[in-house]
Amino acid sequence: MITVSNLGLRFADRKLFEDVNLMFVPGNCYGIIGANGAGKSTFLRILSGELEPTSGEVIVPKNLRMSVLKQDHFKFEEFTVMDTVIQGNQTLYNIMKEKEAIYSKENMTDEDGIRASELEYDFSEMGGWEAESDASLILQGLGITTDMHFLFLKELTGSEKVKVLLAQALFGKPEILVLDEPTNDLDIVAIRWLEEFIINFEGTVIVVSHDRHFLNNVCTSVCDVDYGKINLFAGNYDFWYESNQLMQRLIKDQNKKKEEKIKELQEFIQRFSANKSKSKQATSRKKALDKIKVEDLIISNRRYPFIHFKPEKELGKDVLTVSELCKESESVLLKDISFLVGREDKIAFVGNELAISELFKILSEQSEADSGTFKWGVTVSKSDFPKENSEFFESDYNLVDWLRQFSVEKNETFIRGFLGRMLFSGEEALKSVNVLSGGEKVRCMFSKMMLSNANVLIFDQPTSHLDLESITALNKGMEDYSSVILFTTHDHQLIETVANRIIEIKDDGTMIDKQCSYEEFLDFKSGNI
């Protein structure tokens, strides 16, 4: 059990949170949620002992081993994959290396023999003889095949390194797992394996993630970092979200009724306070007014942008025809890709991300296929969200002037109102676009798309850099959109709730096309249907 007692943290004049009192109990998975900047990752750093709080303490029993997902893979570039994973249990790894050093000596002393005997005992007690096989099972579960286990980490791709570091955190049966964004760069197969691992884990799991589907599948409780507090709620993310939205509505309704009553009393007092015949009633109402206190909504750092795409004109019968598209780069990306898009299609593309990005570039006329054709219908107007958006922000424009480029209505009041709905209010609207964060740039790109009033939208990984609130708003905006969407994303829930059709681009460049939900497609892939 981890006990958090009267915990507080301040940076200069800024209070991140205070008076935090929590208990994390074995057998549970706790999802840490909150807006960007609320302090989720900072809280994990305090729990892991990396950061000292301003006040209070975190009590972790000394006999419990805590394993933390590391973010810096450069630290392990000169280690093999296997050695990197086994370092998840540093004590075991040190014993293993000390043993190897003793046995590699040409002439062992008596002291070496005694020390080797002690190490062998400790090694056996800690499950050292099963270490490589245990590490191998975890690596394979995450998609790192056996032929890669003795490569150096520097020989792997970025996403492969992320998987190795995750395997390192999971290795060695720790009692406590602390995971910051563990699903980043994981494919759906690896995410499903991780979900099963956490569900079956007997210790305590504390996790930060922007993947709502993952949080729903693994979490038994949610820790909400907000209001300068960290509050614990039973249930998964969806249960917390629905409960939170209901609570906010109730508070607003309650305040609205109180405000109406106050207004009524104030009007009565103003009208009759000078009238002697009504003065007693006015006095009684003044007393009633004094007793009514409007409960201010608790100030939250959680904000939801307003994302709403509206097509200006309806699509005709013909939307998009793709015929035998082929594209090669260093390998085959697209091989004889053919499909038709109907007026009611919302298609999620899954599989080879490089191939999908290239397909979207071809369809947006930013790249050319090696062979094959595609044809958009005459009624189509399209707007796209590229995976890389930096070229759009290479200017000294402020936000108002940047967005004005893409708007028919040039009035500053209109532009500022639009930006306000996208969480750029007041002076923020005058920020230079070349200093925006990744999440702010994404919201700007959504604004550009909304102003286009296009009847076909193309999204290439739109949830990158977004917090849960913006992802939720995007999800609703895509669900409510009444026309065609072609998109790819790592967000399982976004695919499940938006797509009515799945197209997989496989590693060999060929495709599978299924008119079904994402869950049905995954069942099809796994052979369940």
Image: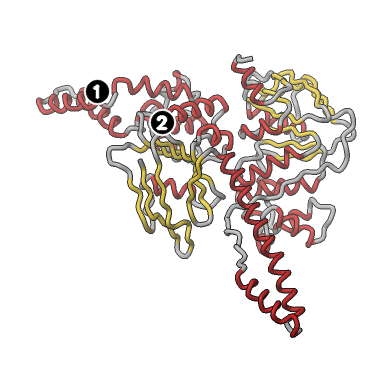
Separation of residues labelled 1 and 2 (CA atoms): 20 Å
Question: Picture quarter containing residue 7?
Answer: bottom left
Q: Judge the density around disc 2: few (<14), some (14-19), many (≥20) Cα neighbours within 10 Å.
A: many
> Which mark, residue 124?
1
Q: Tag 1, which secondary structure?
A: helix
| Vertical placement of residue 293 versus 192, above or below | below
Q: Determine which residue is flagged by label 2.
A: 170
Image: 448 above or below 79: below
The amino acid type found where label 2 is placed reads Leu
- Does residue 112 sit above or below 288 in this rendering? above
* Nearer the observer, 385 or 74: 385
Asked if one can make out residue 74 in the rendered structure from this viewpoint, the answer is no
- In the rendering, at what x and y percent does residue 439 appear? 62, 48
Q: Position of residue 125 (x, y in %)?
A: 24, 25
Splitting the image into 4 quarters, where does residue 385 fall?
A: top right
Question: Quadrant of the image for the C terminus?
Answer: top right
Q: Amino acid at mark 1?
A: Ser
Q: Position of residue 277 (x, y in %)?
A: 75, 83
Q: Is residue 386 left or right of residue 89?
A: right
Q: Is residue 513 above or below residue 94?
A: above
Residue at (74%, 78%) from the top-left corner?
Answer: 270
Instruction: Please provide percent x and percent y for residue 245.
Output: 63, 48
Front residue (pair 365, 179): 179
Residue with the most extreme left position: 110
Mark 1, Cα crowd under 10 Å, few <14 / some 14-19 / many 20+, is: few
The residue at the point 68 percent across, 50 percent down is: 305
Please give the name of the residue rendered at 48% of the width and 33% of the height, measured from the top-left corner. 162
- Name the residue located 39 percent from the left edge and 27 percent from the top edge: 80
Q: Quadrant of residue 398?
A: bottom right
Q: Nearer the viewer, residue 237 or 235?
A: 235
